[in-house]
Amino acid sequence: MMLLRTCLLLLCFLVGAVTRGAADDGYRLWLKYDLIRDAGPRRQYQQVAQFISVGGQSATLKAAAEELQTGLQGLLGQSVPVLSDAKGRKGGIVLQVDAAAADKAGLGPDGYRIYADKQNLIITGRRDVAVLYGAFALLRHVTTRQPLSGLSISSVPKIRHRLLNHWDNPNGTVERGYAGSSIWKWYELPEVVDPRYRDYARANASVGINGAVLNNVNASPRLLTAEYLPKVAAVAGVLRPYGIRVYLSVFWAAPKVLGGLPTADPLDPQVQQWWKAKTDEIYRIIPDFGGFLVKANSEGEPGPQDYGRHHADGANMLATALGTHDGLVMWRAFVYKADPKGDRFKAASEEFLPLDGKFQPKVLVQVKNGPIDFQAREPFHPLFGAMPRTPLMLEVQLTQEYLGFATHAVYLAPLIKECLDSDTYAQGKGSTVARVVDGSVDKHSVSGMAGVANIGADRNWTGHPIGQANWYAFGRLAWDHALDSKAIAAEWARQTLTTDPAAVQTIADLLQQTRSIYVRYTTPLGLHHIMGEGIHYGPQPWLERSARPDWTAIYYHRADSVGLGFDRTAKGSNALALYKPEVQNLWGNAQTIAPDYLLWFHHVPWRQRLSTGRTLWDELCTRYYSGADSVRWLQRQWAAVQPSVDPALHADVAARLQTQHKEALWWRDACVLYFQTYARRPLPAPLAPPTRTLAEVQRLVDIYQLR
Ligand code: BDP
């Protein structure tokens, strides 16, 4: 009797667990493939998914077929056999490489086409990997419940090299990573190959990412050693079927540290020989190695300038070492010498503009979206459009170093789009950053976009569940920068969070607002670089002293009894002159500049009336307060979708939003109280003054600065 009861109880528990479903831990990202519960649409998809036929044996085609099989079986609840030949059968999906047809259709190496012929659904492209992209596109199509009848889609990426940059260290830590330790387990490799690498590759391929720089730009020489290269090769082996090439960040002084040479001078024949031999060694082990990423003479890293050479000497030396190997040198333009009298805004332009036309064809110069450093809002980097003879890669940051770590919900597609859509006027109106980067403005055949990864070993990959949307959106925008950021948000939410259309809409709406809300409660009106020293978390606008003047906050906001903001007009640093006249007109006049950019370019009197009708001081306070209030709005919106989202996942985001609100108040109070010491004015009605003192907020910030 007792036994029977125990068995019954156990049975009830198991049935309960199965019907409830396991809590969603976020591991599956947007590749969930949960059953389509609505029988009507499910049947329609079932009719065209009777089988998958794959015309080829390659690992990539196999991966495509496997993904479709897993995906469709999950979505449709039926088994879908994989055949090597359709043999006149109808009602299936046919994967086929067709170079001639792809070339005729202008698909390029990666573009795909999906269309319905009389019998089947065909996915085709010039190469295996194009077919793989098509397979993922079809799954996205089904997951987002779009019709298949009469289907005909072609899609060609606008950017050739779509890369994640991992800032991962060989010891397992991640620079500016907030989702746990590195996913690359260097100590275990190459013998232990974590199955997670394959899921990483699947996720990337699903959004078209085709390259990964595995290690931090502040590079350790370790990965270049004969001991470590087989580890790199093991990772490359897992990523290869998914069309992802592996790249390495290199430590400039490696010939000294690893090769025992007395110098790392790029013009020294022994140094050149060392790199040539090292490059050949890499290609022997990893034949499709992608190339090198270099941070040189930046923030204390060694570089060619240590030997009186310039960046092009260094980049070209590596390009020569690559020789006939099919690889790239991505040379970063993130450089700024410590100059108390200078303007960091201009530093990269000063070093790189004279080098335009001096780089070898294998070199791309990688430029951050803005001139300072991944701030919540920056004007586009003045190098875009100013180096016509050099292909420029765009670098954006997905890890939220300056955007609230993995605690604040900030969807980054609007930030990335704001940069991409900015007009440089390089070749007249319409020369957007997007078109500079995709090569169309200056007729470059090579192009690239890099996203600094927000991925770590946390079960859900990105710490904050919403961070997944940033990984997703980066891939989608690198593929097609014309996509709309809210549409991407909806697409992501539909695949990741809920199938309920109203909830998807609410989530897309709220995601779309997150970045501007974050800007308002941290750095409204064009304030920048006023965050906590070193960790870059929380507010510290009062920071006056640091190892370098341009690491303080006062260097950037220039608050005084008269006003606030950095004068970058001709009366100030004249950084504005780096832009084309049309852009200077847009931003040069404090009366007409969009308020969002105001303090980037102007020192504005506190009492000055802005285009919003308020004085600078009143507008500043209003934005800080409305920004913090808007986090409450985010919370309400998120609460509204609760019935449609997995409970564990919903609770996780809801809890993070609580922290976000608390910290929005922290930012608000710190900045309003601090700037008030200069403005010496009361808060405009009806805003209630903070209930804590400046000293109290400062003490709070001090805690975060403790070691
Ligand atoms: C800064 C980060 C630093 C990076 C640097 C870079 O604080 O950790 O090494 O950028 O991009 O934002 O090289």
Image (cartoon, helix red, strand yellow):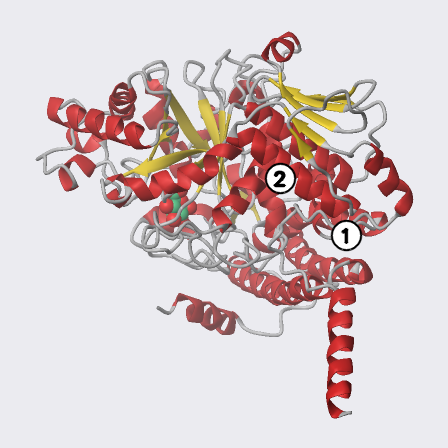
Q: Would you say 86 lies left or right of 331 here?
A: right
Mark 2 belongs to which amino acid?
Answer: Ala
Quickly name the residue at label 2.
473
Marks 1 and 2, how far apart at CA: 17 Å
Q: Residues within 10 Å of mark 2 (few under 14, many from 20)?
A: many
Outermost residue toward the left?
262
Q: Quadrant of residue 642?
A: bottom right
The secondary element bearing badge 1 is classed as: loop
Give the residue displayed 12% in from the left and 22% down from the top: 269
As displayed, is residue 8 above or below residue 326?
below
How many numbered tags mark residues here? 2
Give the residue displayed 59% in from the left and 45% down from the top: 470
Give the residue displayed 78% in from the left and 34% down from the top: 50
Where in the figure is residue 53, as x and y percent of width and height? 68, 28
Q: Nearer the viewer, mark 1 or mark 2?
A: 1
Q: Would you say 226 lies left or right of 427 here?
A: left
Camera-nearest residue between 24 and 507: 24
Quickly name the residue at label 1.
498
Q: Residues within 10 Å of mark 1 (few under 14, many from 20)?
A: some
Image quarter of the N terminus: bottom right
